[in-house]
Image: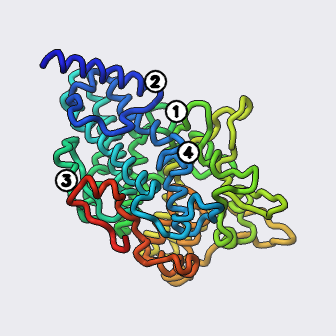
Amino acid sequence: MKTIIKIRFVFFLLFVMVCTSCKKFLEIPPPKDAIKPEQIFENNETATSAITGIYSRMAVSTSVFGGGLNSVAVINGFSADEFKSHGATYDELYKNEIQTRSTYTSSLWTEPYRYIYTSNAILEGLPLSKGVTENIKKQIEGEAKFVRAFCYFYLLNNFGDVPLNLTTDYRINEIASRSPKEKIYAQIIADLIDAEILLSSNYISIERIRPNQWAAKALLSRVYLYMEKWDLAAQKATEVINQKPMYSLIDDLDKVFLKNSTETVWQLMPTAGGNTNEGAFFILNATPATTSLSPDLISKFESGDNRRVKWVGEYSNTTGKYYYPFKCKIRTTTATTGIAEYSMVIRLAELYLIRAEARIHANEIPLGIADLNILRKRARALPTTAIPYPLPDILSTLSKADALLAVEKERKIELFSECGHRWLDLKRTNRAISVLAPLKGATWQNTDVLYPIPDAERSKNPNMGQNPGY
């Protein structure tokens, strides 16, 4: 038996070394007879590689969080009203006719659960690891809880009730039934409150690719907004907004998405040899084969809005004019460009939008409108003869209903093509049906607001139900 354990342990160490060298860790769930967690973390380096490997896996082109072809930015964007489909590749998403065997929704399910499994393994192993120093344990524990909360946030808001797995014990996980959203949100909040305490107030390095205390507060602010806890959402947003000079809005819109910009709360570093998956996927240099921005989105930009000028690219040929997200400017890395941009996951502008909405819901309408106008001022073009009053301030005298519609519009314009915000916004505000049904036509069903539980998961777990409409 000891010989078998030694062989397994040597194999696992080799596996960790290989995964660390390519910045990956546990890309698939480990076998059921995997090494005990306490044997994984012999020292600070192996413990650190476990958590940083998650971020590296998130950044690859096929990841659901990496901004590329299978990402929440693309999948959720097609489900909403952000993108126009070219060809058949994304038609099931664009027409909201997703099948229970869809590879897209399968990725949205399986990949976050892999990160959750790894986070659970880290949390189980750290207290028992003798070679990891206390300050490193504290940091990694905070990051593991942050990652678990982040993954559950997207699982919950894409699929509804999901299994709440807080252990690596496959005997429990493989038969877990779906937990109600209230229980999932309670765990998300608990994890993020712990992360606030455990994580450093500074970034671990000059890079902003490992979450810190403020990233936990930012995500917690978003969660409170979704739960309609307005005071708490505004409070956490304010804490991040006031953390100057670490965070500040950037006046030059061309520089917002650069690596380590002061607007960055959390980014993912692209894999070696390239810039962002967003740049590679979205930027057009030919007639689009799969994706362009929807005419509906383009029509919502007001005159004199530099976000239309700076963040929307245009490609024209004999077949027509096409628009694409141009927040990331580099499509192909060259010796000249280097790696200049990272994939944005959480940025400061979202915190202003969260606070604006929370304040309006709390009947502090002028204060909420003021937050919106901060972002509009940043995006305002200089006056011209043709546009003498570009992107004017929103009036603070708006009714509450109109002020909330102004928030919805500003979120659509500010956060388009980022991390699925538009799709999740329409669902959480109960606006998906009224907005999308007229655009989608006969293919829309009201049950489309939730994705189907993948067939593969239901076939493995007898206690896994299906969402209505599938």
Indicate the amino acid at tag 2: Ser
- Element under disc 1: loop
Mark 1 highlights which residue? 206
- Element under disc 3: loop
Indicate the amino acid at tag 3: Ile
Q: Residues within 10 Å of mark 4 (few under 14, many from 20)?
A: many
Mark 3 → mark 4, Cα distance in angstroms: 35 Å
Q: Nearer the viewer, residue 129 or 249?
A: 129
Q: Nearer the viewer, residue 225 or 281?
A: 281
Mark 4 or mark 1, whichever is nearer to me: 4
Mark 2 or mark 3, whichever is nearer to me: 3
Mark 1 → mark 2, Cα distance in angstroms: 21 Å
| Circle 4/circle 1 CB separation < 8 Å | no
Q: In the picture shown, does residue 173 fall above or below 237?
A: above
Mark 2 highlights which residue? 21
Mark 2 → mark 4, Cα distance in angstroms: 21 Å
Mark 4 → mark 1, Cα distance in angstroms: 16 Å
Mark 3 highlights which residue? 175
Residue displayed at 64% across by 58% down: 291
Mark 4 highlights which residue? 343
Report if residue 93 is visible in the image. Answer: yes
Mark 2 → mark 3, Cα distance in angstroms: 35 Å
Indicate the amino acid at tag 1: Ile
| Circle 3/circle 4 CB separation < 8 Å | no
Mark 2 or mark 4, whichever is nearer to me: 2
| In-image side of 42 versus 87 (left or right) | left
Label whose residue precedes the other's in the sequence (2 or 3): 2
Q: Residues within 10 Å of mark 2 (few under 14, many from 20)?
A: few
The x, y position of residue 244, in whole percent, is 51, 47
The x, y position of residue 266, in whole percent, is 48, 45
Residue displayed at 49% across by 58% down: 351
